[in-house]
């Protein structure tokens, strides 16, 4: 996580790799949120005894200070039923909407993790349990950021594994008055100092024009963050390495930004914009798509520039997919919303992405080096192509 000792060590390692790649390298300090997950406990009693549930705190959740709270649990399997509920005073709310396997399954079910705590607090609930956002049934709880609504009482929130969510649901069906015991010591500790890492190869024709390749370095406390986003960092640095090893002199400056705190508040990207936002950017390519087979790129770009890139892309056939979305639709991305910079996203196959996302399953043992090599080759080819296409276009 940002602000941790392991994060600092990772920055030092990647700095060394950037230097080996022949880039000009620097680090910039940035204030990052310091939130400590601590330990959590969640269990209930039935006729066979104590039933422990695999649970971890949602990111940025407050805790109970280690105090156990024992209350009736009320289950909701969809948002509509929850909104119909009246008072939930003195209860623990259990959000149990399953994530489906459709393309937008994560966003459809994500409301319960992101906003569920404040929604439940408005109805008088004392705590929240949330089903992990994953389409598979297993024993690994998934964390992720929650957002407390300003002016609403903050209540603690835990995520439980999908398997345990099903077990808890079955127990509630048998005993609608079931009580669970909930405790957590997660807490905010203000801010800490993290570091953005920047490496670049200056352009020989337009050194003042920048192609920015970005990837976040932070992960969650319960995960090595192998696919989210160690591979993205490696793929970004590979662009510098391949350019340098092949002796390629870019026309425009190729800059890689390894930034802090994507998972919580984007403070690393915001700090970068504060310091470097007034420079001239051709585009910002974000790499955060996992470690499966490369698919292509999604471009929030003008139709004119997109068509020129696609013309070369189609003739060279180095990427199977090149999508375009209107440039004005990229306002969700900081460098576009503040500086109107075109934003591109590298895309990998995501058929297994959410099976391991934000969990301890996301570890280096699942990374296939051959796939990463293929993805790095595609990304580098794209950067090389666009560097040539845009040399005199913008």
Image: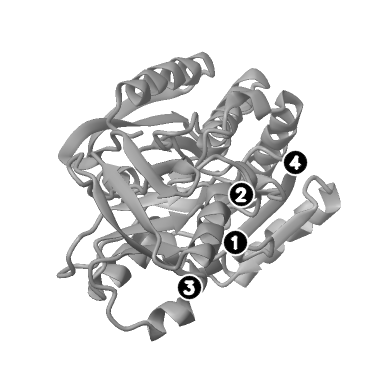
In the image, which disc is placed on residue 328? 3
Sequence-first disc among 1 and 2: 1
Distance, label 3 to label 4, CA atoms, is 29 Å
- As displayed, is residue 170 above or below residue 257? below
Q: In front of the other: label 3 or label 4?
A: 4
Residue that label 2 marks = 354
Sequence-first disc among 2 and 4: 4
The reply, left or right, for residue 234 in relation to residue 277 is: right
Distance, label 1 to label 3, CA atoms, is 30 Å
| x, y percent for residue 259 | 38, 38
Distance, label 1 to label 2, CA atoms, is 10 Å
Q: In front of the other: label 4 or label 1?
A: 1
Sequence-first disc among 4 and 1: 1
Mark 1 and 3 residues: CB-CB less than 8 Å, in contact? no
Residue that label 4 marks = 293
Q: In front of the other: label 1 or label 2?
A: 1
Mark 1 and 2 residues: CB-CB less than 8 Å, in contact? yes
At a point 58% along the width and 57% down the height, the residue shown is 393
Q: Residues within 10 Å of mark 4 (few under 14, many from 20)?
A: some
Residue that label 1 marks = 99
- As displayed, is residue 157 above or below residue 229? below
Q: Secondary structure at mark 4?
A: loop
Sequence-first disc among 3 and 2: 3
At a point 53% along the width and 60% down the height, the residue shown is 169
């Amino acid at each position: 996580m940002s602000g941790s000792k392991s994060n600092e060590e990772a920055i030092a390692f990647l700095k060394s790799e950037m230097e080996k790649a022949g880039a000009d390298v620097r680090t910039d300090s940035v204030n990052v949120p310091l939130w400590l997950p601590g330990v959590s406990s969640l269990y209930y009693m039935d006729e066979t005894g104590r039933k422990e549930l695999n649970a971890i705190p949602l990111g940025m959740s407050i805790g109970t200070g280690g105090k156990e709270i024992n209350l009736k649990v009320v289950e909701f399997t969809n948002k509509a039923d929850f909104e119909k509920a009246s008072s939930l005073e003195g209860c623990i709310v259990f959000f149990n909407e399953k994530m489906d396997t459709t393309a937008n399954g994560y966003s459809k079910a994500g409301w319960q993790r992101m906003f569920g705590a404040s929604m439940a607090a408005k109805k008088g609930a004392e705590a929240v349990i949330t089903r992990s956002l994953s389409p598979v049934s297993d024993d690994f709880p998934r964390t992720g950021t929650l957002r407390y609504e300003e002016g609403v009482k903050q209540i603690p929130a835990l995520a439980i594994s999908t398997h345990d969510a099903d077990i808890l649901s079955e127990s509630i069906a048998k005993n609608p008055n079931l009580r669970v015991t909930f405790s957590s010591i997660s807490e905010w500790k203000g801010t800490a100092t993290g570091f953005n890492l920047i490496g670049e190869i200056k352009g020989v024709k337009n050194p003042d024009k920048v192609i920015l390749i970005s990837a976040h370095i932070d992960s969650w406390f319960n995960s090595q963050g192998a696919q989210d986003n160690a591979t993205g960092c490696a793929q970004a640095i590979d662009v510098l390495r391949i350019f340098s090893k092949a002796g390629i002199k870019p026309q425009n400056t190729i800059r890689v930004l390894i930034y802090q705190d994507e998972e919580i508040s984007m403070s690393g990207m915001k700090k970068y914009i504060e310091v470097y936002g007034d420079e001239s950017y051709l585009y910002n390519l974000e790499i955060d798509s996992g470690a499966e087979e490369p698919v292509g790129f999604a471009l929030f770009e003008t139709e004119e520039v997109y068509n020129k890139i696609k013309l070369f892309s189609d003739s060279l056939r180095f990427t199977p997919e090149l999508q375009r979305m209107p440039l004005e639709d990229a306002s969700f991305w900081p460098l576009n919303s503040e500086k109107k910079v075109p934003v591109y996203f590298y895309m990998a196959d995501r058929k297994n992405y959410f099976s391991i996302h934000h969990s301890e399953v996301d570890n280096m043992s699942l990374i296939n080096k051959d796939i990463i090599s293929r993805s790095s080759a595609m990304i580098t080819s794209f950067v090389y192509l666009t560097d040539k296409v845009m040399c005199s276009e913008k």
